[in-house]
Amino acid sequence: MKVIWNSEIVDRSEVTIDPEDRGYQFGDGIYEVIRAYNKEFFCLDEHLDRFFSSAEKIEMHVPYTKNELKHLANRLLSETGVNTGNLYLQLTRGVASPRNHMYPDASVLPMLTGTFTETERDQQMLDKGIHTIVTEDIRWLKCDIKMISLLGNIMVKHEAHKKNAYEAILHRDGIVTECSAANVAIVKNGVIHTHPDGNLILPGITKLVWKRCAERLGIPVVEEPFSLDELYNADEIFCSSTTMEVMPVKKLDNKVFFSETAGSVTRKLQEAYKAEIEQCCGKLPVH
Ligand SMILES: Cc1ncc(COP(=O)(O)O)c(C=O)c1O
């Protein structure tokens, strides 16, 4: 399997990770997950812009230009032969010995790795929707940084898993923020409500795309904090992420939101989102 390792595409077996890499020791690094369909990246520019923005927020220098990263990503795409899948791109602050919390000086080069795995679109899941639970947002206060220290996200995802749910919808003091690995929105009386960008959520690229779709479809979007009460009493709930796209929430704790088909606003957004993918990456297989 071919992977990105710094500025090269190498065989996975050639990669060595130093035990004193700061990503490994401190979770000191950033990442992106970028989807490709039909051998074409979707929203590559937007993802790389967020990658640079995350790096800037933790004062980490990215020793590549955006074009160099695009070139590496496209080389990996062609060398792996993946058709539809996820590129995972990670940059850590590099190897500094002995271990020290302080940022190392500029002579320490950040370490770039990237893997690509084939992952089909799950049309059945997109039709059926997912089960979710509500739990407290236990994460730190800089959730806008797409950083690799994901323990808080992992713990709430595990809590969902233990309750046979796929995702955890998070709240801080009764205000709904996002999910363990996705943004979340509700629909009430034809209006979409979602938490505004800022330090409490990740500014999702999928959210960016579905907001554009909503605008085109004339569906109003309100980006203001909303409560758990509003969540439970919503007409529709959907999550969004690069890997899930626009995913209907079928069940929230014990409340079922639909039996066969998701609500009409969610379905319209799903279709519009699919059309955006097809415009960029070509026709998707019919299921
Ligand atoms: C915590 C969190 N929020 C939101 C998202 C959605 O972001 P995007 O649409 O860019 O994938 C993700 C994606 O992994 C995430 O981990």
Image (cartoon, rainbow, N blue to C red):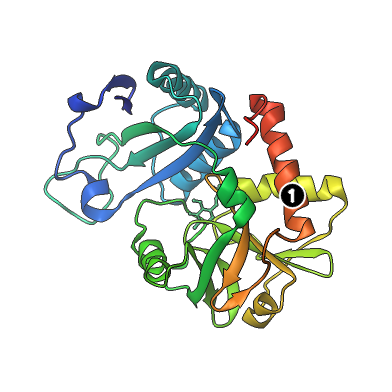
Q: Amino acid at mark 1?
A: Leu
**136 and 285: which is toward the camera:** 285
Within 10 Å of disc 1 (Cα), the crowding (few <14, some 14-19, many 20+) is: many
State the residue at coordinates (15%, 45%): 20
199 or 102: nearer the eye? 199
Q: Position of residue 98 (x, y in %)?
A: 11, 48
Residue 266 at least partly seen: yes
Residue at far right of view: 218
Position of 26 with respect to 19 (left or right) is right
Q: Position of residue 234 (x, y in %)?
A: 72, 73
Looking at the rendering, in which quadrant would you find the N terminus? top left
Q: Quadrant of the C terminus?
A: top right
Q: Is residue 246 visible?
A: no
Q: Residue at label 1?
A: 269
- Is residue 88 positioned above or below 198 on the image? above
255 left or right of 105 in image? right
Q: Who is closer to the viewer here, 134 or 161? A: 161
